[in-house]
Image (cartoon, rainbow, N blue to C red):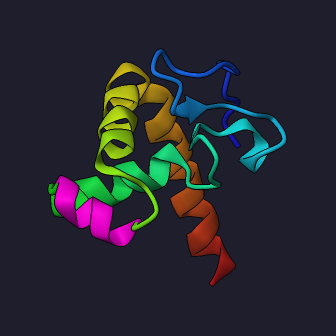
Amino acid sequence: MAQVTENKPSKRGRIVCDPRVLGGEPTIRGTRVPVSSIVVEWQLTGDEQQVARAFPRIDLDAIREALVYYESHRAELDRLIEENEEAASRAF
């Protein structure tokens, strides 16, 4: 699993990296929803409203912040997404 080097909240504070939650993968504060999951749903649909429907407990502002975080940490998150997809394919 790729190491997540940042372990402080994003500027607005909704994106956090806590080593006790999902191994430090960036998540939406107060949830176990990883930013990478938000990104994958957005890549599949290209629609913030659809992402909000897929994650009903996450408000649109948090989804937007996750996507902004992704733009700032694209290489790191793309690596996490790829590793997660590889692990999922090996599980079957």
Q: Name the one closer to the observer, 87 or 46.
A: 46
- The image position of residue 11, as x and y in percent, is 47, 15
> Residue at horizontal 77%, vertical 43%?
23
Q: Is residue 10 above or below residue 38?
A: above
Residue 63 among magenta residues:
no
Q: How many marks?
A: 0
Q: Name the one closer to the observer, 64 or 77.
A: 64
29 vs 11, left or right, is: right
Q: Is residue 24 above or below residue 41?
A: above
> Residue at horizontal 48%, vertical 44%?
35
Residue 49 among magenta residues:
yes
> Residue at horizontal 15%, vertical 55%?
46
SS assignment for the magenta stretch, majority: helix
Q: Furthest residue to the right? A: 20
Q: Quadrant of residue 70?
A: top left
> Looking at the figure, which quarter contains the C terminus?
bottom right
Q: Is residue 44 above or below residue 9?
A: below
Part of the protein shown in magenta: 48-55
Q: Furthest residue to the top? A: 11
> Looking at the figure, which quarter contains the N terminus?
top right
71 vs 92, left or right, is: left
- The image position of residue 76, as x and y in percent, is 51, 29
- The image position of residue 80, as x and y in percent, is 55, 43
2 vs 73, left or right, is: right
> Residue at horizontal 22%, vertical 66%?
50
- The image position of residue 75, as x and y in percent, is 43, 27
